[in-house]
């Protein structure tokens, strides 16, 4: 499968895959942080907490592409501008972006490809890291956090170990330290997912893949995670260090031809087996920085044996407990499930997703996660975005949304200049930001807040522009223009606007940059 290889682990064969989520606004208790909290994050037992000690739950989504030959986010080729896509993620309630990359994208002279310069003129000619800078900056303005994920040594594909002949461990660590220095002081970027899905390779006893606790420095992923994690913390002590599991603790595949099941090792998903982490924990030089990050998938990725258990899905909590959940339940460390997803084509998978999310718990005290993926082009899971990169897969979203904690405020430095009105005395208030401009056009974001006491269903926003200013494109609403009047109608997947809630409408326009005027929400003038 492109861009992630189709494989899976049952006696050692493993799979990687993808899919994504949705969101709702969740209120916080006094001991809970609003959105993703304040300042840098750290851990306390099985909780992630902010700089004030308030509990934070990361409920995010993966946006991949920087680990592929394109060396930048997929979907930049679409008609939905990159900011519009982040706007949608945030408005749906995703509070964290997990961003996969390969070391190829970090090389000097690396080129980002398949970027629609018409839709994204501000990305024209930029390299992979420069585009990453922009995405991180804007995500911070939306109140989102970012986890960087070293997904692959090269764009060619996954690796069982964290290094290859062409990308040695020294390069892996040096690149992590470079990124830690690049984003030092930027509290939007909260940590490093050290290496994606270390897994078994070679048949035992001649194992050549990643083991956990075996003591071989060339194969023991736990020891490698300590080396890399401590190297990162030496230059950026505020980051969280996210450590995935392996597939088989021995690092090798079982010999299924010996006809002796007693010799077969208990293996799980690539990156999903943390059974040995309790006995052999990752030891970091800075306390309260370790988060374990397993991966979990369903039948659209690989048909594991537990899906055929007569007691399914009642058997699943014990399986999750065994592989990684015990770390959370025994208050050893937080869990941030870095990938999980399905196409939901099989009814078994829908039940799996419902039960998995219930297992993580509701509210701010539940386990953190980042759903795979925003992208619709993930071959064995699909995405939250549909193929147009604008509309949403509502079936997946409906299952995941009760578990999401929406982002609030902004974490990023240097937010775009904006013009805000005071607290409204009428039915709505408006904040407008011009987010980009070029010769003959501009891009903006209009946030409209329902200041009334009732939910609006459906909602509709109108505004006027001077003569000569014409609409180019719009997102987060169905945006049309007639004369100088622009209408933004509620999308089918988000028709309601609750009292106190806001919607951010993004657009590009042709002509002299002009702020919307005479803004109205459902016919009532906004202040």
Image (cartoon, grey):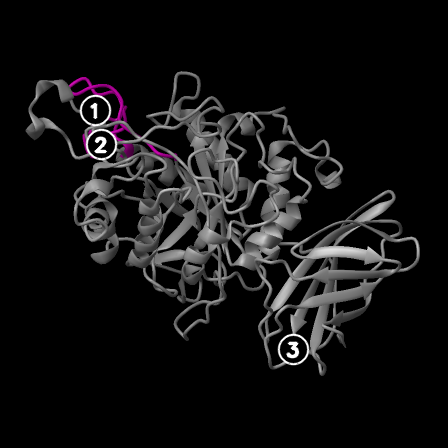
The label shown at residue 253 is 1
Q: Which residues are magenta?
A: 195-221
Image quadrant in which you'd find residue 182: top right
**Closest to the observer, 124 or 461:** 461
Query: CA separation, marks 2 and 1?
Result: 7 Å
Q: Badge 1: how crowded within 10 Å, few (<14), some, or many (20+)?
A: many
Residue 119 placed where, x, y %? 73, 40
**Closest to the observer, 12 or 130:** 12
Per the image, the residue denoted by label 2 is 248
Query: CA separation, marks 3 and 2?
Result: 54 Å
Horizontal side, residue 317 vs residue 190: left or right: left
Q: Secondary structure at mark 1?
A: loop
> Can I make out residue 285 in this image?
no
Q: Is 211 situated above or below 489? A: above
The label shown at residue 451 is 3
Image quadrant in which you'd find residue 74: top right
Residue 525 placed where, x, y %? 77, 76
- The mark lying in front, picked from 3 and 2, is 3
Q: Main secondary structure of the magenta part?
A: loop
> Can I make out residue 79 in this image?
yes
The label shown at residue 73 is none
Q: Are marks 2 and 1 in contact (CB under 8 Å)?
A: yes
């Amino acid at each position: 499968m492109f861009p992630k290889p189709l494989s899976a682990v049952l006696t050692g064969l493993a799979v990687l895959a993808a899919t994504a989520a949705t969101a709702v606004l969740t209120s916080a208790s006094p001991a809970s942080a609003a959105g993703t909290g304040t300042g840098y994050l750290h851990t306390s037992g099985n909780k992630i907490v902010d700089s004030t000690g308030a509990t934070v739950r990361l409920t995010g989504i993966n946006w991949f592409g920087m680990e592929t030959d394109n060396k930048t986010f997929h979907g930049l080729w679409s008609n939905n501008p990159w900011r519009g896509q982040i706007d949608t993620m945030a408005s749906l309630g995703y509070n964290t972006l997990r961003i996969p990359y390969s070391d190829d994208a970090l090389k000097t002279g690396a080129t980002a490809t398949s970027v629609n310069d018409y839709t994204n003129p501000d990305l024209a000619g930029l390299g992979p890291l420069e585009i990453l800078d922009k995405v991180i900056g804007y995500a911070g303005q939306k109140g989102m956090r970012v986890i960087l994920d070293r997904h692959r040594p090269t764009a060619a594909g996954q690796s069982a170990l964290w290094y290859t002949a062409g990308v040695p461990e020294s390069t892996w660590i040096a690149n992590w330290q470079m990124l830690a220095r690049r984003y030092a002081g930027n509290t939007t970027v909260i940590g490093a997912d050290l290496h994606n899905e270390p897994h078994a390779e070679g048949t035992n006893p001649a194992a050549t893949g990643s083991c956990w606790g075996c003591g071989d420095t060339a194969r023991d992923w736990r020891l490698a995670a300590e080396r890399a994690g401590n190297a990162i913390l030496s230059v950026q002590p505020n980051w969280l260090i996210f450590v995935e599991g392996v597939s088989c603790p021995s690092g090798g595949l079982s010999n299924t031809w010996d006809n002796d099941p007693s010799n077969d090792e208990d293996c799980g998903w690539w990156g999903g087996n943390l059974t040995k982490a309790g006995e052999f924990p990752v030891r970091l030089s800075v306390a309260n920085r370790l988060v374990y990050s397993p991966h979990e998938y369903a039948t659209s990725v690989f048909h594991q044996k537990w899906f055929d258990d007569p007691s399914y899905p009642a058997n699943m909590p014990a399986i999750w407990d065994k592989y990684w959940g015990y770390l959370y339940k025994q208050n050893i460390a937080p869990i941030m499930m870095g990938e999980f997803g399905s196409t939901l084509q099989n009814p078994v998978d829908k039940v799996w997703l419902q039960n998995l999310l219930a297992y993580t718990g509701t509210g701010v005290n539940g386990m953190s996660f980042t759903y795979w993926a925003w992208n619709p082009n993930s071959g064995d899971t699909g995405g939250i975005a549909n193929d147009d990169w604008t509309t949403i897969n509502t079936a997946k979203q409906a299952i995941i949304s009760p578990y999401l904690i929406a982002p609030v405020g902004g974490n990023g430095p240097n937010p775009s200049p904006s013009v805000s009105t005071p607290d409204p005395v009428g039915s709505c208030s408006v904040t407008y930001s011009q987010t980009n401009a070029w010769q003959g056009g501009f891009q903006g974001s209009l946030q409209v807040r329902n200041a009334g006491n009732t939910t609006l269903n459906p909602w509709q926003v109108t505004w006027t522009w001077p003569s000569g200013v014409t609409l180019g494109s719009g997102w987060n609403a169905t945006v049309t223009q007639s004369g100088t009047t622009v209408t933004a109608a509620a999308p089918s997947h988000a028709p309601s606007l609750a009292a106190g809630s806001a919607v951010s409408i993004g657009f590009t326009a042709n002509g002299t940059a002009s702020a919307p005027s005479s803004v109205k929400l459902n016919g009532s003038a906004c202040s």
